[in-house]
Amino acid sequence: MANKNINFDIVPIFNQSAKGVWTDFVYVENFCNREMFNLYVSEDVVATYLRDFARNLGQWKHNFAFAAYAEEKMVGFIQGFAFEKSSELYSVYSKETFLEHLYVLPKYHKSGIGTQLLKAFEETAALMSSKVVLTPLKSAVGFYEKNGYAYFGDMEKNLVPCANKVVPVFQWVKKDFDVKLNVTVNNHYLQKNKYNPIFAYLNRDSEIDGVIIKTDTENKMWLNHEQDKNKLRLCRCKLERALDKVK
């Protein structure tokens, strides 16, 4: 039976190495695996798992992550990273995002959480990737097919950049963006604060008209002042609203 009456928030996790985040991830994943495979996971195994994640974190070029919260508790998450793929045979070069984990606690299945996590992941991945690639569990194939994925060895889905939307930006690297920047952004400032919350506003042509970042001391915003006053006001409001929702 579908569980449609759950209130939940989808929140971008900009700094996955922050205190407690990996612990929450591991709790959700291990609980789901125990339910699925009837496994018992010891505290030593969990501790090793956490150390491995912490070590790998710095090696991944971009670390996309969103969590679902219900009743102030993490009940699901999605996590992955971008990588560059080339083929000498066809002289093809592309940027892809690999979806590594998507888990939702069994109690919250069929509530729409998995679909919303996937949608948020795809929207931000589309800033710098042409597609999402994943290796699914057999039991999850139907879920991904319903969300537009198809088999090509693994499962994958081509991405289209968002329009009229604010999306989070993970580990900002300006050269990685294929979308047009209509704002002059202090890239050094962003690099220095790359694990802080950063959002970009994309206009109807999927061009970036605004960027906002939250630091410990201030919020910094860059806007395209060539747009008309109403669009400028909308851009500013949407960026500020997105930053206010970050936990």
Image: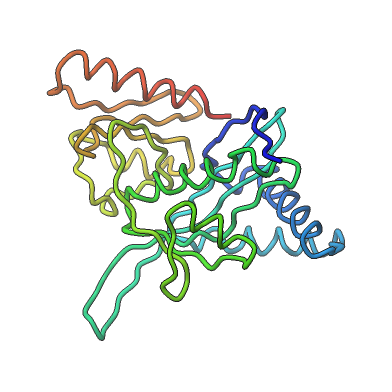
Type of colouring: rainbow
| Outermost residue to the front | 1
Relative to 234, does residue 103 appear above or below in the rendering?
A: below
Q: Position of residue 33 (x, y in %)?
A: 75, 60
Please tell me which residue lies in front, 120 or 246: 120
| Residue positioned most to the left | 226
Horizontal and vertical percent position of residue 146? 49, 53
Determine whether, in the image, residue 215 is placed left or right of residue 39. left
The quadrant in which the C terminus is found is: top right
Q: What quarter of the picture does the N terminus occupy?
A: top right
Residue in the foreground of this view, choosing between 63 and 115: 115
Name the residue at 46% across, 42% down. Answer: 120
Residue 131, x across and y down, in percent: 36, 59
Camera-side residue: 69 or 18?
69
The image quarter containing residue 92 is bottom left
Instruction: State which quadrant residue 192 falls in.
Output: top left
Q: Is residue 190 left or right of residue 181?
A: right
Give the total of numbered labels: 0
Identity of the residue drawn at 33% across and 63% down: 95
Q: Is residue 86 above or below residue 148?
A: below
Please name the residue shown 20% across and 33% down the image: 183
Q: Residue 143: x and y, percent?
A: 56, 55
31 vs 75, left or right, is: right
Q: Nearer the viewer, residue 140 or 32?
A: 140
What residue appears at the point 35 percent right and 17 percent down from the top-left corner? Answer: 237
